[in-house]
Amino acid sequence: MNAPLRRVGVVVLVLFGLLFVNLNWVQAYKADDYRNSDYNTHRVQISEYQRQRGSIEAAGGVVLAQSRQTDDDLKYQRMYPMGDQYAHIVGVKPVSNASTDIEKLENAYLQGNADSQVADRWLAMLTGKRTSGGNVLLTLSPGAQRTGYEALQNKGKVRKGAVVALDPSTGALLAAVSAPSFDPNPLVSHNSKAATSAFNQLEQNPDKPLFNRAFSELYPPGSTFKVIDSAAALANGVQPETVLQGGTSYTAPGTTHVIQNAPGVFCPEQITLKQALTVSCNTAFSRLAAEQLGADPIKKMAQAFGFEEPVRFDQDPKNVMGVATSHTGTMQDPNGQVDRPTVAQSAIGQSNVQMTPLQGALIAATVANGGRQMRPYLIDKELAADRTPTYVASPHEQRRPLNEQNAGTLRDMMINVVASNDGTGTSARIPGVQVGGKTGTAQNGNNPDHGWFIGFAIKDGKPVAAVAVFLEQAGSGGSHDAAQIAGNVMRAIIQERG
Amino acid sequence: MTAPAIPAPPPTNQGDGATPTRPSRSGGRRNAELGLLVFAMAVVGLYAAAAEAALMGRVTLWFLGPVAALGAMFFVAHLMIRWLAPHSDPVMLPAVALINGFGVMFLRRLDIADVKEHGGTSIPVFGGQGGRQLMWSLLAIACAMLVLAIVRDHRSLSRYAYTLGLTGIVLVMIPAVLPARLASVNGAPAKLWINFGFFAIQPGEFAKVLLLVFFAYYLVRKREVLSLASKRFLGIDFPRGRDLGPVLTVWLLSLLVLVFEKDLGTSLMYFGMFVVTLYIATERVSWLIIGLLLFSGGAFSAYVLGGIIGGPFANFHQRVGIWLDPFAEPDGNGYQLVQSLLGLGTGGLFGAGPGVGHPEIVPLVESDFIFAGMGEEIGLFGLSALLVVYLLIAQRGLRAAIGVRDSFGKLFAGGLAFTLGLQVFVIVGGVSKLIPLTGQTTPFLSAGGSSLVANWALVALLLRVSDAARRPADGSASGRGGGPSAGGPVKLQELPTEMLKAGTTTRHNGDKA
């Protein structure tokens, strides 16, 4: 009977091995999910307020969120000194409701519960001192953020929109503004009822201040999508000087819908690709896409820039920041055949093409950075309670939709949009800096048009900023305003970062 | 059979501790046991002090009370073992003591948190849940020593196999026939208890040991018949149809447990226990396969039936549903498992530290979910260490089974050790979402007197068998090498128990080693 006894020993060993592997799954692999689960607030709530939560800061030490001691049962009160300016990025850490954005993403570290802080915890246990949690330093540039925020506040007629700025060479997020915004402070009141009612009010507000228009909402990109068309054309052998057929109107085969140019756009019958981009000629791009390129090259190029695939910030694989996925639609009819009228519409960023302002900024950044798309990130450093860094971000290249040469060509074409006097983006100009970009006016059903600008700034041959500005239902002149805001934001970045 | 299943003679009541032949060996073993015990108590004391420091902000000397009481009792147990089972495994007692100590101290830590919540400052040594557990522990150890004193030779148990087996079945059945209000506690659907109002016992905990005596006895008698193969299929010998009787009977019994007591865990325990002893007895892998098929078939149809007709199967169906997706109803049916997982996850690799977590959020953290509750505070590393200690106990039990010479002892000890391991698997797997949750106690850890007393008795029996296994072959221990030669035919006649008569009737072809 000894042989089966030994085998039973092995069986027991295997059973315990299964337990061990499963515990690893629960306590190591899934630990962060569980720890930060929305259903874990009760457990976390009690212990969390025993210890000072770390602060969240923008570049230059500007404090965005901090915890102050109170006489309350919950020993610390979370506060957001910058009010509504950073609300959609920093998020909130309410007492009983679910936390959001950076407050959620970095919860364990802010709280001091991350695995990287185990030494601190043991030290605290041995010495009996309660250390505060870790601090999170964001990549945001306070000047750019303020400029974008104020631009969306002061415009009078424009109250909704978004500004996103990236560092093209690293992918660091420099600004992300969504308007209208909200003051996060009432939401973290220790009075749970007041906090919940404040939240409900915001949620029922018809202007939807809780929406993060910078990351989480999709809008038709309008003419900014012509940058993708141009990239696809360059990749398929079309040159900037190649002459396209433009004109005042274009009717795609198989439809009676007439595509026209925006009022005031001068687009002759014969127009080069470069000039078509500069003046934003709808007819040339629609005809190019529907009759010359076809759906696939455009869809492929859009995907190469990050459409269809979820954009994820570095360190945020679970998409806590709530980034929506931009998409082009299939451009096919119900039978699965390429639908040329749809291609023609899609080429000018209408039909089913939708993108986030973040995606717009990524497109501009990629072109400015020689075709190399860096993975966007917003956590610059994690600093322990004594401010020694335990994590420092390192830039990663994530895609290369264009080769160096085509990227350079497209960059010059976009610079022409701003620099040329007949270009649409002249209001984005910054003295002494090469600015490139593309405007967009997107039709929005029967509502006023959306205004767009995506662009970049190159200083001394180096890309220093890429911006997307989106003005919701801005009506005519929206893209002009958007370009101006983008110029101001980039100027702020250059001033602050040199 | 690989081992010479040669029986020993009736117990000769030798002056155990005074066996003069190799005093140094057994003495060294016992000293090792004492050393390990001191170490275990030191670890438990440190844990208790750390928990108290975290909860109260200071360390009073109160935590020493339970540690001292437990330590003293373990020391007495150690002395008793020196006297009653001097050759037994030296690791077993300290390993169990460590887990038992952790259990008491974790429950005490829950008390402290509770008292603090209501403004109190300290609790008496025997107060609260921890105090009750401490009392039960002392009682359980005393009972274990009593078992060790009464059962001087494990083979004598087989003399009462039928009586004990019948008692076991009755114990299993009582909760099933009792009305629900007398058979369950805490409003749980599982009917596993006999509720006397002021206290409740879980008869199933005792039944497993009693049933195992019967299984071992029965299988020693029948193993040759049961190991006869008739059909070879896919390279595996399958038994004849008529020999399936006993396994089908136990299968039905465990299904009845599943249906009437609404508890998959107990059902799985009994059936697993039987199938594994059957396998050990016959060395036929086919029994394992048949057992696994029967059980999974039974469990699956219970699940399907629960979904269609509900009734007695509904509870099982619901548990499987929770297991498949606890987050479907995180505030409803899934709450317990969700909170268990969140607690484990919050603990992470290193745990929040003793006394720092919030295990009290998980319902039933003092009994079924104690492993998850501790996991929040001692982390993956702490839990892994606990698992290793459990594994050590089970493997040492199996080692005793391998070492002992008689078939009954082998089956009995092997069954006990496996049962212990299986129970840990069933409950720990349940709270960590490896398998559907069932209401088992975590041996030596969970609050509950029945479980403690029964499992300590189990340990006493394992100590008894390991003592027999490790008793030196020379000297007066003539029973060890009594047989003609290893691998020779089994002489069932020489079995010292009533197997003698039964053996003659079933002996047909001896053992083909």
Image: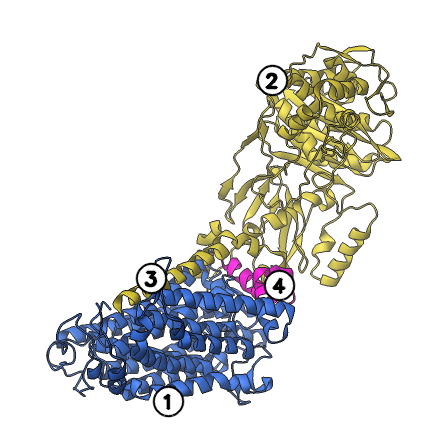
Q: Secondary structure at mark 4?
A: helix
What colour denotes chain B? blue
Question: Which is closer to the viewer, label 4 or label 1?
Answer: 1
Using residue B147 as the reference point, say whether residue A218 is left or right of it: right
User: Which percent across, then down, holds residue A409?
Assistant: 64, 15
Q: Is residue B60 visible?
A: no
Give the amino acid at mark 4: His
What distance separates the C-alpha of mark 1 from that of mark 2?
A: 95 Å
Q: Secondary structure at mark 3?
A: helix
What distance separates the C-alpha of mark 4 from that of mark 3?
A: 41 Å
Give the amino acid at mark 1: Thr
Q: Residues within 10 Å of mark 3 (few under 14, many from 20)?
A: few
**B497 lies above or below B304:** below
According to the picture, the residue beneath numbered tag 2 turns out to be A461
User: Which percent across, then down, holds residue B169?
Assistant: 44, 84
Q: Secondary structure at mark 2?
A: loop
- 4 and 1 marks on the same chain: no
Q: Secondary structure at mark 1?
A: helix
Give the amino acid at mark 3: Val
According to the picture, the residue beneath numbered tag 3 turns out to be A10
